[in-house]
Amino acid sequence: MPDKRKEHTATAHPHNKVNKYFEAQKKTVYKALCEYPMTSLMIANYTGILRANITRYIAELTEEDKIMVVDKKLCPITKHRASFYAAIRELF
């Protein structure tokens, strides 16, 4: 009896659009941190990406050794102590 299940290709899977969207956001966060050190709220205001997503991207990029904490001082927006992240320049 022939197998009637549909084969899922890379273009047919609905999650691929979502994954590409999040990957694009992650790249945007990385590019923003290449410009100058920022807090997560500063990145959110600069890029328009939700801070919850930025928190996840920061964790992923830190784990991948693409960004690092460069300073902990008062955020110019919130006036509270926050970590400033920057891209590691040697990756270019």
Image (spheres, helix red, strand yellow):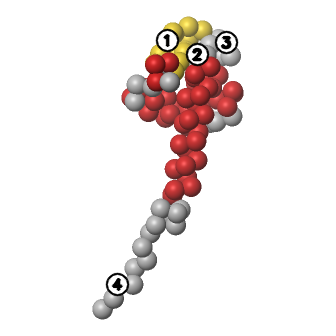
Regarding residue 90, the answer to whether it shows in the image is yes
What residue sits 56% from the left and 55% below the top? 17
Rendered image: mark on residue 76: 3
Q: Which amino acid does label 1 sit on?
A: Val
Q: Mark 2 points at which residue?
A: 37
Residue 67 spot, x, y in % from top left = 47, 22
Q: Is residue 84 left or right of residue 77?
A: left
**Mark sitting earlier along the chain (3/2):** 2
**Mark sitting earlier along the chain (1/2):** 2
Above or below — where is 89 with respect to 27? above
* SS at badge 2: loop
**Label 4 to label 3: alpha-carbon separation:** 61 Å
Q: Do the residues labelled 3 and 2 touch (CB within 8 Å)?
A: no
**Mark sitting earlier along the chain (1/4):** 4
The quadrant of the image that shows the N terminus is bottom left
Label 3 packing within 10 angstroms: few (<14), some (14-19), many (20+):
few
Residue at the extreme bottom of the image, as rendered: 1
**Label 1 to label 4: alpha-carbon separation:** 56 Å
Label 2 packing within 10 angstroms: few (<14), some (14-19), many (20+):
many
**Label 3 to label 2: alpha-carbon separation:** 12 Å
Q: What residue type is labelled 4?
A: Asp
Residue 16 spot, x, y in % from top left = 52, 56
What residue sits 55% from the left and 44% below the top? 22
Q: Mark 4 points at which residue?
A: 3
Above or below — where is 5 with respect to 61? below
Residue 75, located in which quarter of the rendered image? top right
* SS at badge 3: loop
* SS at badge 4: loop
What residue sits 49% from the left and 34% below the top? 56
Q: What residue type is labelled 3?
A: Pro
Residue 81 spot, x, y in % from top left = 56, 11
**Label 3 to label 1: alpha-carbon separation:** 16 Å
